[in-house]
């Protein structure tokens, strides 16, 4: 059984941290470690985490430079074969999620370096849920093909290549750069057609959507070495897809799933 490191980051998350903790520590998959990286919360977050200290392998609470800096601390503390980031407010789909994933992995001929699946998105300031099927990873040039909470990375690949989230240069889209760079390091990937997570849309990349789009264009240029013309075309394609999604959702979903 491969060991998986589950990393949760938090800062002043007393309203949401407990559901995330319970989602992770109660997984039926046994070979796991749980890491909580807190940014020095001033509310009741630390007290709530303390209620579950016997189930938490690593707990760090100190000021950081942002969520990706905290995720980097999670990487440095992780000792598993794989790593997944389930941040405060988010949850794994159900308590059998990891068991189901690794049962399928064990049936493959080769051990994948990267596993991804589908996500359920909790709408911003609403209880409405949107079931979001992953795109194929060949569309990584377009953007994140699933939520990073539905991505499982080989920790060995990460540490051998000194891969970290670029918090300073890409404070909104560092997860996109991280994933693109990771995919350049291996082609041993596996998609699992399962719901892996429930993602709470109340995030910084949603609030700062325009900045995120700009950062993504710069990442395509830096990592994929795309020309300005190609990046311009991708930007137009993304804006068109957003228009379809907002105004003609049925057409948008048909096009999306055909790809």
Image: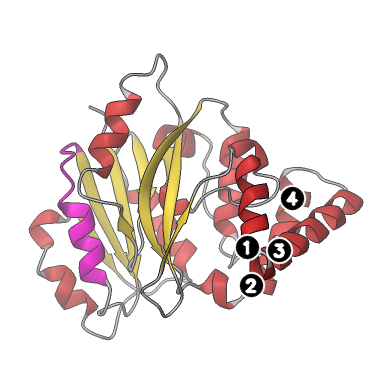
Q: Main secondary structure of the magenta part?
A: helix
As drawn, the residue found furthest toward the bottom would be: 43
Callout 4: 10 Å neighbours few (<14), some, many (20+)? many
Say which residue label 1 marks: 249
SS category of the residue bearing label 4: helix
Say which residue label 2 marks: 209
SS category of the residue bearing label 3: helix
Say which residue label 3 marks: 244
Question: Mark 1 and mark 3 in contact (Cβ < 8 Å)?
Answer: yes
Residue 127 vertical position relative to residue 90 in the rendered view, above or below: below
Q: Where is residue 72 in the image (x, y as percent from the top left)?
A: 44, 55
Colouring style: secondary structure
The answer to which of 156 and 238 lies nearer the viewer is 238
- CA distance for labels 4 and 3: 23 Å
The answer to which of 104 and 131 lies nearer the viewer is 131
Q: What stretch is highlighted in magenta?
A: 17-31
Q: Does the magenta stretch include residue 150?
A: no
Image point (29%, 31%), residue name: 102
Q: Position of residue 34 (x, y in %)?
A: 23, 51
Image point (20%, 69%), residue name: 18
């Amino acid at each position: 059984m491969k060991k998986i490191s589950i990393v949760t980051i938090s800062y002043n998350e007393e309203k949401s941290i407990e559901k995330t903790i319970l989602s992770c520590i109660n997984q039926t998959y046994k070979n796991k470690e749980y890491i909580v990286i807190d940014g020095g919360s001033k509310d009741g977050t630390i007290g709530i985490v303390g209620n579950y200290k016997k189930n938490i392998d690593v707990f760090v609470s100190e000021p950081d430079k942002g969520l990706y800096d905290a995720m980097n601390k999670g990487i440095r503390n992780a000792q598993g074969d794989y790593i997944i980031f389930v941040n405060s407010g988010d949850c794994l789909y159900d308590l059998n999620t990891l068991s189901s994933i690794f049962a399928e992995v064990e049936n493959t001929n080769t051990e994948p370096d990267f596993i991804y699946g589908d996500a359920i998105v909790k709408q911003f300031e609403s209880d409405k849920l949107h079931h979001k099927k992953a795109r194929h990873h060949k569309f990584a040039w377009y953007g994140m093909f699933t939520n990073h909470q539905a991505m499982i990375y080989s920790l060995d690949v990460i540490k051998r290549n000194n891969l970290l989230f670029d918090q300073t240069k890409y404070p909104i889209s560092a997860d996109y750069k991280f994933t693109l760079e990771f995919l350049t390091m291996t082609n041993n990937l596996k998609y699992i057609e399962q719901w892996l997570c429930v993602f709470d849309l109340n995030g910084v990349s949603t609030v700062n959507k325009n900045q995120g789009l700009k950062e993504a264009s710069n990442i395509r240029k830096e990592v994929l070495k795309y020309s300005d013309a190609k990046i311009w075309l991708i930007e137009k394609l993304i804006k068109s897809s957003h228009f379809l999604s907002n105004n003609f959702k049925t057409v948008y979903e048909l096009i999306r799933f055909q790809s």
